[in-house]
Image (cartoon, rainbow, N blue to C red):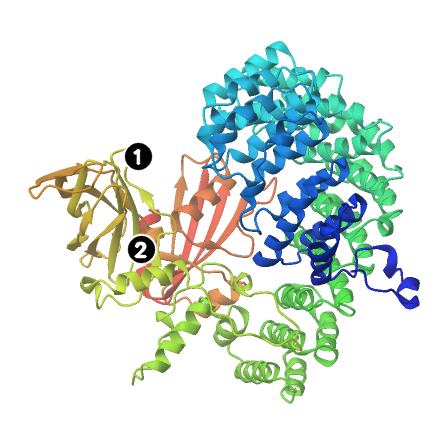
Amino acid sequence: MLKKFDKKDEESGGGSNPFQHLEKSAVLQEASARVFNETPINPRKCAHILTKILYLINQGEHLGTTEATEAFFAMTKLFQSNDPTLRRMCYLTIKEMSCIAEDVIIVTSRRDMTGKEDSYRGPAVRALCQITDSTMLQAIERYMKQAIVDKVPSVSSSALVSSLHLLKCSFDVVKRWVNEAQEAASSDNIMVQYHALGLLYHVRKNDRLAVSKMISKFTRHGLKSPFAYCMMIRVASRQLEDEDGSRDSPLFDFIESCLRNKHEMVVYEAASAIVNLPGCSAKELAPAVSVLQLFCSSPKAALRYAAVRTLNKVAMKHPSAVTACNLDLENLVTDANRSIATLAITTLLKTGSEGSIDRLMKQISSFMSEISDEFKVVVVQAISALCQKYPRKHAVLMNFLFSMLREEGGFEYKRAIVDCIISIIEENAESKETGLSHLCEFIEDCEFTVLATRILHLLGQEGPRTSNPSKYIRFIYNRVVLEHAEVRAGAVSALAKFGAQNEEMLPSILVLLKRCVMDDDNEVRDRATFYLNVLEQKQKALNAGYILNGLAVSIPGLERALQQYTLEPSEKPFDLKSVPLATAPVAEQRTESTPVTAAKQPEKVAATRQEIFQEQLAAVPEFQGLGPLFKSSPEPVALTESETEYVIRCTKHTFTDHMVFQFDCTNTLNDQTLENVTVQMEPTEAYEVLCYVPARSLPYNQPGTCYTLVALPKEDPTAVACTFSCVMKFTVKDCDPTTGEADDEGYEDEYVLEDLEVTIADHIQKVMKLNFEAAWDEVGDEFQKEETFTLSTIKTLEEAVGNIIKFLGMHPCERSDKVPDNKNTHTLLLAGVFRGGHDILVRSRLLLLDTVTMQVTARSSEELPVDIVLASVG
């Protein structure tokens, strides 16, 4: 029943929806007990009740099985009425309740489906197919075939769409209706032809040859339905992608021919398909871009929006292809629809020349306040791309970004701007001080904790290296005074970094940190006390290790290791080298902070890939006593082709004095079972194979794992690079492919695998040093060595940098992996940890003349890592 509205509801607009205050029990009671049982049946009242039931179901109201079944059987009495509206409402309700009520199969009468009243037949077919299960489908198969080829379009479409739904549960039955669907595909009605083609495609979609034949048949004879054309274009583009996108294919010719179709939707679909084809050249894009250019001047807003959005996508990969549309896009900048105007400007930003940037920025600023945050983010992304394209324009673009930063906006919008500014600061050294100053102003009034802490981290990292670092202290200390705990903690860390790198400012920083020691929050107090004590020692090594670079360990791994240490009391002190290293920079491990006022739920930290391997290897008795796992190779190495009878992939695990090779094996022969599978390895260098751990059984298509344990070279510890020849040995037992039962007797066999390489990168774990100079001083020059090499085969600095990073497997620091343009000298800074937990730092000075000359300086806390690096490079 509808509740009575009072005047207050009416004034607040609460009465605009007549179904807003429906109560489920009252509606079902009214239906079952009163309205549906009236004689004669009142069609208008009954249709109104059915509308209420449908509204409740679609609003997510839960109907119990008993309630639904009672209402359903009460509703069957309504079939006595011949009112067309009521009959169609009955069928709609049957469809919605078929999955809730029981015994709905009782209404599977074929009278309406085959009757003379055309308006009943379509809904009857849809309802019947909805409530018919796969066991009953054959009983109505004849009627469905007749309905598919019916002359009444609504009946034919209903049968075709219902067949499409039935494919999911009764594919083999529906497959027999292909001839009728073929006949329907020749219909003059645009919807019937579209639905028939849809059914034919879904029946044949797993057979590429059949799909190709279907496309060629219908494209040759032409189609009447624009919807059918759109579907054929999508099918053709999918086929092209599967065929590696050959542009000589008749499928591509068909899509291109659709650009000249008389229907706008077909033309746009064809243009969109060409634009989205992978690896499309500018020449192949040209006809699609020309069509989209015409749509830019269409009187229809939807077409203009579609065209400019698609051109925006093209401009990301092929900006030159869109340049011809610049005049049309400039006309759209003043479009009344702000979404179109925004997309037009962002496209122009990607395609325009350096000289047009100032003018475009003025045009954007005139309506930025009128568009939604979603489109503002699109503008910011376009500006970010523009900064990389025209570095000299960073001043204009930065000023525009700062004006946007001062405006109102949501978190995603502000984060996009901050990300863009930070990327500009990183790419352009000249923009650093301006950018940091504006970010300082932003955090004075920043409501987002995540952004404030991120900017404070950036200030601590970049601020001390600027020409006048003291000017940032006021902004940072204001956060300690004015903000909540998480931001205060970030500000304390930033202050400590200034004190660690600037001796002149150290006394002032110590005074500020002493004020923070009495903070209300534990984290802020602990940080302030810790940093204060470290800075008072005035030792560069301590500053580098505990303030500037911090711990390079996995935070979840450290938590687990400490928990394990507390559970198993030991006289030995906790060894930090037993903690797995962070595989990503520490900043990326932190989850987004939540406000301190929110209740914090303890979360279970997911195990990392390396920790999972550590547990698996610790469970193997032969590997007891190897110590903590130092590194596992990031990707398994394939030792066979994926199509061969045995598929073998190897993961390399490095310990302090040993390596374990894990071989994941799959047997793809269904008439064999392999037993006692091992991979025998022969090293070329001084490695020694200690033992093999076999995979006991390898049935068909069930993966198994075997291991090989080797000792690292002792006589010549610098010879870490090695090639292993590998042979898989096993016992073969023939088995029945159907039952999987294996013979009792077997025979020995072997299978030669690809050689396996071990390089220096397998012995070094990447670590990020935020301040390389401090880390360099911290390690000291006791074990420093230097050598010069000529890279005779390398002709560019970029190639040299990429090869060195890949070969050594170390992390580039301070963005030294990016070589400035038009330079013939470059310094590459690399950081890592050698197995055993020894820091290894490399400074590589590169000089490009005819070839690249490289001077390598390596430092470590031990001599062996330095010798190994220089021996490997040599």
Residue, disc 2: 868
Q: Is residue 214 left or right of residue 507?
A: left
What is the crowding at mark 2: few (fewer than 14 residues within 10 Å), some, or many (at least 20)? some
Q: Identify the residue under disc 1.
A: 641
Image location (x, y in percent) of residue 98: 58, 46
Does residue 778 appear to the left or right of 78 in the view shown?
left
The kind of residue tagged 2 is Ile
Vertically, is 739 above or below 1? above
Which secondary structure lies at badge 1? loop
Give the number of the disc on residue 818: none
Q: Amino acid at mark 1?
A: Glu
**Image location (x, y in percent) of residue 65:** 57, 56
- Residue toward you, 423 or 236: 236
Asked if residue 388 can be seen in this view, the reply is no
> Which comes sooner in the sequence, label 2 or label 1?
1
User: Going by the image, does 742 lie left or right of 426?
Assistant: left
